[in-house]
Amino acid sequence: MAGNLITYRECIKQALREALQADERVFVMGEDVGRYGGAFAVSKNLLQEFGPERIMDTPLSEAGFVGAGIGAALGGMRPIVEIMTVNFSLLALDQIANNAATLLHMSGGQFNVPLVIRMSAGIGRQLAAQHSHSWEPLFAHLPGLRILSAGTHEDARHMLAPALADPDPVIIFEYTSLLNLEKELPTSINQVDIHKAKVRREGKDISLITYGTGVYKCLAAADELAAAGIAAEVLDLRVLRPLDDETILASVAKTNRAFIVEDASRSVSVSSEVSARIMEKSFYDLDAPVQRLCGAEVPIPYPKHLEDAAVPQPAQIVSAIKTLLQHA
Amino acid sequence: MAGNLITYRECIKQALREALQADERVFVMGEDVGRYGGAFAVSKNLLQEFGPERIMDTPLSEAGFVGAGIGAALGGMRPIVEIMTVNFSLLALDQIANNAATLLHMSGGQFNVPLVIRMSAGIGRQLAAQHSHSWEPLFAHLPGLRILSAGTHEDARHMLAPALADPDPVIIFEYTSLLNLEKELPTSINQVDIHKAKVRREGKDISLITYGTGVYKCLAAADELAAAGIAAEVLDLRVLRPLDDETILASVAKTNRAFIVEDASRSVSVSSEVSARIMEKSFYDLDAPVQRLCGAEVPIPYPKHLEDAAVPQPAQIVSAIKTLLQHA
Amino acid sequence: MEQQPLQSIKLTAEQARKLLYQMLLIRRFEEKAAEMYTKEKIRGFLHLYIGEEAVAVGVMQALGPEDNVLCTYREHGHALVRGMDAGVIMAEMYGRQEGCCRGRGGSMHLFDAKTKFYGGNAIVAGHLAMAVGLGLADKKMKRKQLTCCFFGEGAMAEGAFHEAMNLAALWQVPVLFVCENNLYAMGTALRYTHAQTDLEKKGAAYGIASASVDGMDLMAVMQAANTAAESIRRTGQPYFLVCNTYRFRAHSMFDAELYREKSEVEEWKKRDPVPGFFNYLTQQHILIDNDFKEAEAKVEKEIEKAVEFADACSLEPVEELTKYTYSER
Amino acid sequence: MEQQPLQSIKLTAEQARKLLYQMLLIRRFEEKAAEMYTKEKIRGFLHLYIGEEAVAVGVMQALGPEDNVLCTYREHGHALVRGMDAGVIMAEMYGRQEGCCRGRGGSMHLFDAKTKFYGGNAIVAGHLAMAVGLGLADKKMKRKQLTCCFFGEGAMAEGAFHEAMNLAALWQVPVLFVCENNLYAMGTALRYTHAQTDLEKKGAAYGIASASVDGMDLMAVMQAANTAAESIRRTGQPYFLVCNTYRFRAHSMFDAELYREKSEVEEWKKRDPVPGFFNYLTQQHILIDNDFKEAEAKVEKEIEKAVEFADACSLEPVEELTKYTYSER
Ligand SMILES: Cc1ncc(C[n+]2csc(CCOP(=O)(O)OP(=O)(O)O)c2C)c(N)n1
Ligand SMILES: Cc1ncc(C[n+]2csc(CCOP(=O)(O)OP(=O)(O)O)c2C)c(N)n1
Ligand SMILES: [Mg+2]
Ligand SMILES: [Mg+2]
């Protein structure tokens, strides 16, 4: 059993290696992906294995190399562009929003952009205000993009291949705080449907809807709730854009209650969208109002106790849900 | 009466002139604000009136001059930075999100950034995919910013002064499609509370919640609904961040129904947030689920008929509300 | 310091006719577009290239059909020289579904896969990094072709210019960067845009071979572009060519031109590249007056046909609004 | 081409002692910080400046208390030389509310209004435009002061560098741009970051006066910084100074240093600026061994005091998490 344990970091690395082996057109580019081994050692030794043409270190030029990734995709390559962390992604957001996301539609269907962008995101390593962003909601607003969030080892391992197979630009969020976490990787699964959300745990009493770093937190909370006799269904959105309404609404239809958990700050977030959709389409299924537990609306501070206080913690999820179900 | 008619453009210009006269520390900078007279003639002749030190033409360097605006604000000035249109704002978003929005908190309260950024936004002039964005939702997600939307002539005229008086960074969205529109400017009003939403028309049957270009559209729809015996309350959010829950919830408590209208594309938008908040705080007030009418999830195409089809139109609002109220 | 042609190009009468035709086609097409704008058949932004024709025509002569081309929103001329059909372009500007982008792009967003025409890009300097990427793909795939990227001098103030130039030089990709220096970025004169106004000197900061040329002189542009393209094809390295030119018309149809004197425009019009080129041809006894008339007549017919075509075109059904937001599965 | 000092600075013993103290204070403070990192008193990112001390110390001598200073995330040294209290800095790095930013910033975000220290900025090149703006405010308010902005050579690949340089030159603002060229941006060597590796040549693209200097030589840096600051104060124009230096330690505490040979580091350590400066002082008979010992002792006490202070500090109450997200009304 322990032999199957694998870190989240290793999952990403295996996915990269597999992609590079599978298709000559695939190459990885980004800051320090090569000689440094990746800012978080995700791509360590890939340079040695695949050479500098396939593992390209770029200068600090986020707009430049993301734009070059778009161009290379137009030119027939299958680039995997790594933005070291989401914190630097705004520098490339114009390229993503105005070029990658619009080209196919604006050209009347002529030009596909088969680009994959990966970035490490989220809070949890005491990196302070400029290095702890959870900006999935910004990207999830933009038409033309497919936004994925790898909240589990399974997804970190198996999302990349379908993302590369997609003819359109796909952005994958990975999570710095999960990198060292070891889990068993189910051997039965070797592909991931990047159009569907995924029920990670079945339950009948309430739908715990989440993504990213929320997944393991909610699973932990669900364990605790189970001990208290509450069967929480944990739904990992996984695809933040376009959202998979069907799976969300089916879960709510079953449980009649939803609780949404997200590290990103609350206003205009993925959880607001999910709540609004449930409002529109499942209002009469609801036994109680949908509630959200989100990140605090604040630049993230450096000290551990404040960092922890800025995002949902499993204990908070548990107590919020207990209160919610008592009320009912 | 006709003597009081004023264009939206002229409202902005008067606000700028007043601000420049009132405080020596105020200056305007941006692309083509001076010699060209402003891309939309908003600042025409201000260069002649105030000179090149106060009306500064900048090169095409959105990140650069927004960053310089932040620096100048730190240095004691009161810059009004014009980003010609929201479509170019992503180039400056890192400066806004990582510097302007974080400096006060991150420095432990030491450094204020009294910066005002104005930008022209929205659809409606057949400018196609890269020039028709409604990106208010992106900005409304970011803690540390105050986000205003000038959906009326009154706000275009009177929002700037309180924005400049605010010690924190304020972003004002203006709307290209309104520039030539003439309205009477109420003489009774000469200040705007930039912390509060505003009921633009009272009604008891349903709350029509909107902002920006939605305001006049919803007022037009409300007129028509009135003719059909439906009293719609039109609520202009006006402050997109931090949202004024009190006014929103009070309106819903009165009407027991809400319909949200927004040009921005639907997913992860301001209307999702408003809907989610109503869900959380007014669920038991609701006689029917809150509905949204938003922009289509698509890069905006050039032809008029498709452009019109991409955003809510008054007729759609009217018919949606009629349906909604019949159902009840 | 403007580039001195090493050896002069000698034109045959046939070559001369083709060039003259291209110059005139742009000029008349754009005049017609302006007319159609006032008739409200064309809407949105319309940026005319009139006065700058020698740049697109001259540079494009150095390109083959396998090369990639990227332009700004001021790209009707480039699209025409590249071989896109005038009617299809006009239809696009009318917003009709028979246009090159189903009418979705309009004047600023002409795209054409057949001629490897990658826009029509309306975020200033937003296409430069894409050009580097196209060059990178070619290099990786060992395709012998180059990517030609046009942009204005205003674009060079954007960080995007800097990043693209540095990446191109570092990665040694076959990209021809063509600055169309028309002295203004909307209403902002060169001296308010750049501290260093000798634009070609900026190439040195990246170790990129650079030259500038009189962009009103078609022969000079052809020469300079040939030199540039040859250098790229030989070395695989990028090249930076500044073409000094002038826009005779307003920036767009919304521009009151408050920022420059009429007299300045008139002064530049004396160097109009269209009659300038024709004068050269007659002086060199390559063509005669009648050739000019014939070219005008041919162009007139072409434009007429284009307008007729566009007028007969239809609108994309509203039901297709979101089609191609994502690829069909 | 490195700058030749016009006239040599002669140090008094008192000046020498102060400089030596500053050099040593940075070195020992950072060694202590590294120790505290392994003890998990400091967390997050920690970027050490060890090896580069002569740059911060040398440049800062040219600044007065009225001048503005902006730095990167590798800024403990700058903060110390600027006169911020070592204990308050250490407390900040411990995340304690007695730290300069209430503990919210940590190592990467030291801010101090009193000494006009504008960070501690962790988005590479994100502070350059702010420096231009601070300079612009000073110019507009007719304040006779300059803004000094430190950044790494890696930052120069960002578009933000280009835009800031061009704006500074165009607007003629009194900003001293100091590139701390330590040859690496994380693991990416200079030659993979820039096509043109003679960094000071990039100043020419903006018409900015530029120079480079041996950043391991405190006297040379002081000289160059003096020249630069004098030029800025005289002309009101920006200046670009490249200090060639080397970081002896890993980029941050997460760095396995796979990208460079140990021997390269050892080679550079022979030019360690701390003993280098002391040797210079003894050779010039300005100080003697005992001065060094005294300086070490003084520094040791200072560091001890700083750690004691930080250890005694408290955490900001969780209730204050969102305080100052907006100003209090
Ligand atoms: C990033 C960005 N900022 C601003 C604009 C608005 N704008 C459109 S064209 C233009 C001037 C561009 O000048 P230049 O690059 O010299 O090209 P030209 O129009 O002269 O051909 C401006 C400011 C834009 N489209 N994109
Ligand atoms: C915009 C941005 N991209 C990437 C990073 C991650 N990062 C932090 S430091 C660094 C290297 C910077 O190198 P340089 O500018 O030379 O400064 P040095 O660390 O050598 O002092 C990188 C890539 C960042 N902080 N900001
Ligand atoms: Mg121009
Ligand atoms: Mg460095």
Image (cartoon, coloured by chain):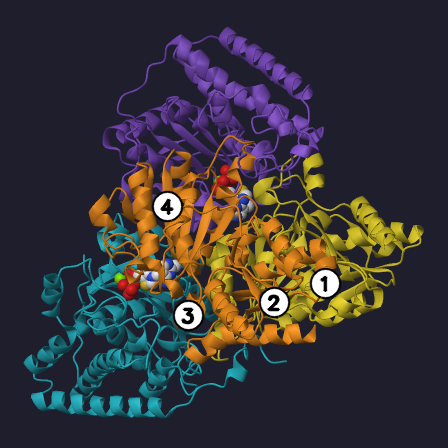
Chain colours: A yellow, B orange, C cyan, D purple
Residue D236 in the image, given as x and y percentages of width and height: 26, 33
Q: Where is residue C144 in the image (x, y as percent from the top left)?
A: 42, 74
How far apart in space, not on screen, are marks 1 and 2 (Cα)? 22 Å
User: Is A225 on the left or on the right of C329, as rendered?
Assistant: right
Q: What chain does mark 2 sit on?
A: B
User: Amino acid under label 4?
Assistant: Ile
Image point (29%, 56%), residue name: B38
Amino acid at pointer 2: Arg
Q: How many labels does the image show?
A: 4
Q: Which chain carries label 1?
A: A
B23 to C41, vertically: above or below: above
In this view, the residue in front, B207 or D277, is B207
Name the one closer to the observer, A24 or D160: D160
Judged left or right of residue A46, residue B96 is: left
Label 2 sits on residue: B292
Label drawn at residue B124: 3
Q: Name the residue under label 1.
A: A237
